[in-house]
Every structure is written in C-alpha cells, then in structure tokens.
Image (cartoon, grey):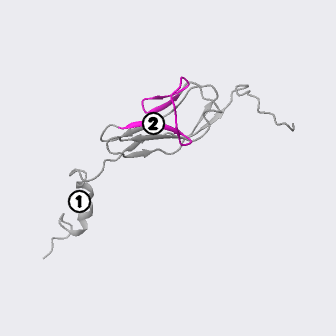
Amino acid sequence: MGAARGTPSSPRWLPLLSVLLLPLLGGAQATIVFIKEPSSQDALQGRRALLRCEVEAPGPVHVYWLLDGAPVQDTERRFAQGSSLSFAAVDRLQDSGAFQCVARDDATGEEARSANASFNIKCESGGCARPLPQTLNS
C-alpha cells in the first residue's frame, strides 16, 4: 500500500521537499537577490543624485556599475558609495544612458544584474546653456 494522501512521503510532495531541503544539504548554488534595484529618475543638471543598489547574498559579493554596458570608473563627480552610485553633479552628456548594478560572487562566479536605470536630466533656468555643435550648412 502507498503512503496516505498528503503525507510527506507522498510522490506529489517530493518536488516541494527537494526544493526546500536541497539548499540545506548544500546541493544548490546560492542566489544573489536585489533588495533595492536602481530606478530611473528625474535629476537636475549639476545637482546631486543617487542610484541605489542593495543586494543580499549568502557570501561576500563585489558590486560594480555599468553605463551602457561599460564599467563605470570612479571620479570626483561620480563614484561608488557602498553598493550605490553617487553623483556629486549630474551631467546631461556624461550621465546619459542606461546604468546597471552588477553583483558578483567571485568565489562561485555567480553574477546578477539589475534592471536598467537612467536619468531624465532637467535644466534649471539657464542651467543647461551649453551651445549645440554647429553644422557647416547653418
């Protein structure tokens, strides 16, 4: 006779039990989870801004940022602050594009990427008064 319906030894419970127990037995790779992902936002030209990124992982992870797929280098104007990306002065030319937070577990090679985030950079009255390049025909 088979096991009583609904008991843990019942075949329909086996997938659930294996999902719950596998991590405890060390049979599954740990997962990096974003607690706070960066989101697109309005920003004023020349003002401070912050793209937040918070991750949770069972072990230490290295967090870095991409802009349009290329690694972001720290400067005095734009730099990592913990796992978030801080801007001392947003610039409509240098900060246009898709930012992405990347968390990597160097021990396991696991990597997680956040959704893309961008700035809608607005100008205060006269704050974006950079002249546009002139064409030869104008």
Mark 2, residue position: 64
Relative placement, left or right, of 46 versus 52 is right
Classify mark 1: helix, strand or loop.
Answer: helix
Residue 108 x, y percent position in the rendering: 32, 45
Three-letter amino acid code of the residue under disc 2: Tyr
Q: Which residues are magenta?
A: 61-86
Q: Residue 113 appears in which quarter of the rendering?
A: top left
Classify mark 2: helix, strand or loop.
Answer: strand
Relative placement, left or right, of 98 versus 4 is right
**Which label's residue is closer to the chain start, 2 or 1?**
1
The residue at the far top in this view is 76
Relative placement, left or right, of 75 versus 7 is right
Quadrant including the N terminus: bottom left
Residue 77 x, y percent position in the rendering: 56, 25
User: Which mark's residue is nearer the viewer, 2 or 1?
Assistant: 2
Q: Is residue 83 above or below residue 20?
A: above
Residue 6 x, y percent position in the rendering: 21, 67
Three-letter amino acid code of the residue under disc 1: Leu
Q: CA distance from mark 2 to mark 1?
A: 36 Å
Q: Residue 98 appears in which quarter of the rendering?
A: top right
The answer, for residue 36, to whether it is visible in the render is no
Q: Residue 88 appears in which quarter of the rendering?
A: top right
Q: Which of the two residues, 78 or 135, is positioned nearer the viewer here?
A: 135
Q: Residue at x 87, y 38 (%)?
A: 137
Q: Residue at x 22, y 50 (%)?
A: 24
Q: Which mark is residue 17?
A: 1
